[in-house]
Amino acid sequence: MAAEDCSNRLGITGLYRYTDVISVIIINLEPMQDEKWEQLVETAKAHFKNAKLTREDLILETPDGPQKQGTQDVLVFDHPSGTRYKLARENRPVVLEKKEMYSHRAGQSAQAQYKFSETEFSHRLRVFKEIDFDEWEEVTLDSLGL
């Protein structure tokens, strides 16, 4: 697929010298909104083999134990070169307020309490390349030499 075709479908402009779809995805540093993500998923399903989309919970360890901090949409597909790629879109609620709780007693540490939005979410897109069976390495602009 030519970079112009992919860039037009994904709403990315100015990417004419890159022919690899993965490069086009990584260079798009704009936030990945829902509509753009759906277009990307449909494009991947149409042009790549074994494209599979799953949703997982994002679990973070906190002092109070593990807590769900959002969801993660994972798109795994086979590139024509034989390499498998994974796109992970993290969906986290926006932080509305942060309170720092301090204690002046010996042995006590500071704690932070967060208030999250129930309707607004921030999104982060990460790209991974499979280097061994089910072992993934994150692909960055530096690793592409850009």
Image (cartoon, grey):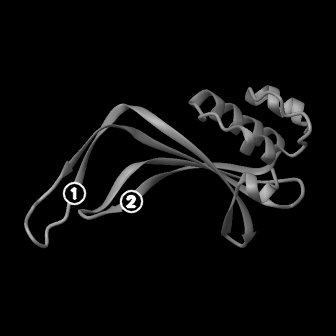
Q: Nearer the viewer, residue 120 or 75?
A: 120
Classify 124 as above or below 78: above
Quadrant containing the N terminus is top right
Q: Which mark is residue 60?
A: 2
Residue visible at 44% across and 54% down in the picture:
58
Q: CA distance from mark 2 to mark 1?
A: 16 Å
- SS type, badge 2: strand
What x and y, as percent, mark residue 135?
A: 67, 71
Outermost residue to the left: 105
- Please identify, in this view, whether the residue under mark 2 or under mark 1 is nearer the observer: 1
Residue visible at 68% across and 65% down in the picture:
137
Residue visible at 74% across and 41% down in the picture:
27
Amino acid bearing label 1: Gln
Amino acid bearing label 2: Leu
**Of the residues under marks 2 and 1, which one precedes in the sequence?**
2
**The image quarter in which residue 93 lies:** top left
What x and y, as percent, mark residue 62?
A: 30, 62
Q: Is residue 111 left or right of residue 14?
A: left
Residue visible at 65% across and 30% down in the picture:
36
Classify 28 as above or below 113: above
**The image quarter in which residue 138 lies:** bottom right
Classify 91 as above or below 139: above
What x and y, as percent, mark residue 66?
A: 32, 62
Identify the residue under disc 1. Answer: 111
**Number of on-image labels:** 2
- SS type, badge 1: strand
